[in-house]
Amino acid sequence: MKTYFLHIALLLLALPATKISALNSISQPTTNPSEVISEQVNFASYQWMHNSINESKFGDPGPRMTVFAGNDTTVCLTSNSIPVHGYATDYYYISWMSTGDGFFDNHISLQTTYTPGEDDIALGRVVLYLVAINNTPIYTRMVDSVEITIVPAPQCFAGLEDTVCKGQTFQLQGEAFYYSNLVWLSAGDGTFDDNSQPAPVYTPGAGDCLNGEVSLLLVASPTAPCTLPHISSMNLVIYDSPEVWAGSDTLLCEGVYTSTAATATNYQWLLWQTSGDGTFDDPSALNPVYYPGSDDMTGNEIFLVLQAFPYEPCFFIATDTIALQVMPRPWVSVGADQTICAGDVVVCSGQAQNYQQIHWVTYGGGGTFAEPNALTTTYTPGSYEIATGLCFLVLVAAPHYPCILSESDWMELKIYKNPTVELPQEIISVTDTVHLSGLMQHYQSCQWHTSGDGTFGDVANPSTVYYAGHNDIEQRLVVLSLVAMPLSPCQITVADTVAVSFEYPRVLVNQMADRTLTGGEILNMEFEVESLVSGQYHWYRNGVWQQNISGSEYLIPQVSAIDAGVYYCIFSNPYFSISSDTAHVNVLEMATQTLSIPAGWSAISSCVIPPFAEIFTVLDPIIRKIIVIYNDSGLFFPHTTKNDIDHWTTHTGYYIKTTESCTLTLHGYQQFPAPAVSVKPGWSLLPVNSLQQVSIAALVGCHQEITAIKEVAGTKMYWPEKAINTLQNLQPGKAYEIFNSASYEVRLNFQGCK
């Protein structure tokens, strides 16, 4: 610690003018500690003159200024900031300075804190200077320094999770820095060859092997002045060699073999193999499905082998085998599906192998077979399948031993009926494009015809579009017909007609632009539709029908806040309805808001928009009391050149620190409806966009993504997951910290959940 003293007498009249000028040139505080020290050396030669002149001319100069920056000290790296306690007497002004890249909480206070920068931490030390100045009875400057040594906290890393085979040892690969001593600890019953080294060898105990894993901890003790050790852990998994049983030998009727009895333990992965030509659905599953190949289904034995592969570093592969014998089952075929016309007879020709008995049956029908136990026979449909148009003819083959399941094949029998066509009696169209949809059944193809001069989008589709011609529009009427051709072998053709009348509207006026008005201005909107058939205009504000407005014009001579909202109009008659564009109307009302700001840290916001929103203009009444103000947009130190915030806004809140409590009154406009606020994922600052207190339940009750809201400089909070809501309401003029648990922005509407 070094102390420097400079004292210049006011009566240095005998000094040359050049020296007096030099003294005046450094009479103000410097901003660099090295410059301050240099000044002390330059003026040391004048100390004797001050003493002799002052004492001889004026006697005792009175109390003399003293400065003490504190004793040199050593701190642990885990500290976020370093308390600084200076001492000074008989001074006019004091200031702290640093040789490093950190910053002081308050550089003009004797009792403050210093937050080291990255260079301070990397260097391991920093020197702080306390400069004191006094102008009475003469200009005097004194400097004292304190050196702070920064000691890193201990660090260690036990390693990532790893594995070892039962009966083997494990080489640990730990790392540690800035420690006084190390020790490895085991949560099990194993042992270390040297538990004081970063990378010892660990031998698992019997209990470790029984549990299948063990947690190992590496503890690094600190070096003074650090007091807390650093602890790291890793999990060691202990594997045993695999054991496997494939199951019992099996006699199988032709089909798939599903393994259900196989067991295996202590394996990393499994593999099934076969001596035949079949396949497994998943050869790595414990109990897979085996699909025998054609060579397997001869009645001869094949072998299925199950292998269990161990976890590394174990290497023993366990194997077991079962014998499988597959017997063939019946095969049957009835041929292709058939389609007949109502009243026809079906000829059935089946084929079968490996069967004991065959039999024809029908599903979905009530007809009869001529010879139900012969491969070739005829079937006469009944009235039920003729009505439904569909049934299924099935040939069933019973198996030989040991198979017990019969095999069957079926064919679909379709029975077509004459076609039907149905069109609406009349269509009223509001445009020259008519959408048509005919109801048709049992038809092969269709075709549209017109009595007018229009065209069809697809003349062969029951659902199509008709484009009216000039004559159709002039006549306001056209007759359309749809003709249906039957499915083969049916031969009857049918048709139906529909009369189309044309009624089409036209929008004449659609003045529904979005707008922002000042209270007292005129709100005028208009929506007018031309139609042959008269209708009604229904105006809506915020989805509510305005029953007192019935015409095509909506006029409010003097708009106010209650008129803000979303407007649209719907014109309707018996044949159509048309909606206007949607107009978003915002209203600005003159308003004044006073923010009460306590001393120290707090958070503020406003819903009043100042006409001059530059940050210096808005904060000018309290600028001398502000230490710092910031938000997500930037940082503003009023007493420095640091300013990232250009304008005051209402869509964000501000953190603020003041030297004393104060009030800030904002005059301007309040917007109705209040703009929604976007809340980004994670923690952010929520402004209160209202002059009245806002219920938290009404604001975020429908947003499950909002999981917490709390005061910035208080203890009240909203935490629904823990059934905590001591906050209840958000107060105007304040801002609150809010947490969005979603990965996307959430928009909060101060009119309530919508």
Image (spheres, rainbow, N blue to C red):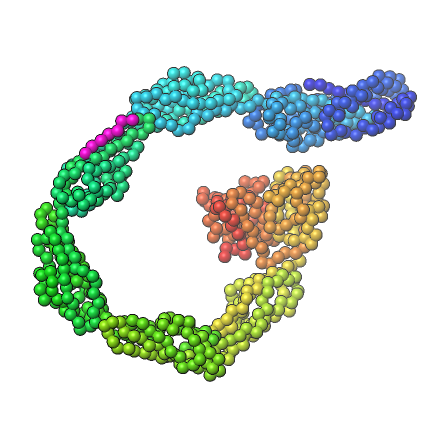
Q: Is residue 362 above or below residue 406?
A: below
- Magenta region: 315-321
Q: Is residue 660 visible?
A: no
The residue depicted at 53 percent of the width and 46 percent of the height is 680
Image quadrant where one finds the N terminus: top right
In this view, which residue lies farthest toward the bottom? 475
Report the number of discs: 0
Q: Position of residue 4 (x, y in %)?
A: 75, 20
Task: State yes or no: residue 320 in magenta.
Answer: yes
Question: Between 158 and 82, which is closer to the camera in this rendering?
Answer: 158
Q: Say whether residue 706 is left or right of residue 121.
A: left
At 9% from the left edge and 66% from the top edge, which residue is drawn?
A: 370
Tell me where residue 507 appears, x and y as whole percent.
54, 73
**Residue 427 visible in the picture:** yes
Q: Quadrant of residue 272?
A: top left
For residue 243, above or below residue 551: above
Q: Is residue 711 left or right of residue 204?
A: right
Q: Residue 687's spot in the image, x, y percent?
A: 58, 48
Question: On the rendered structure, is 535 left or right of 623?
Answer: left
Q: Estimate the x, y position of residue 57 in percent, counting from the top left.
A: 89, 20
Quick one: 723 or 390, which is closer to the camera? 390
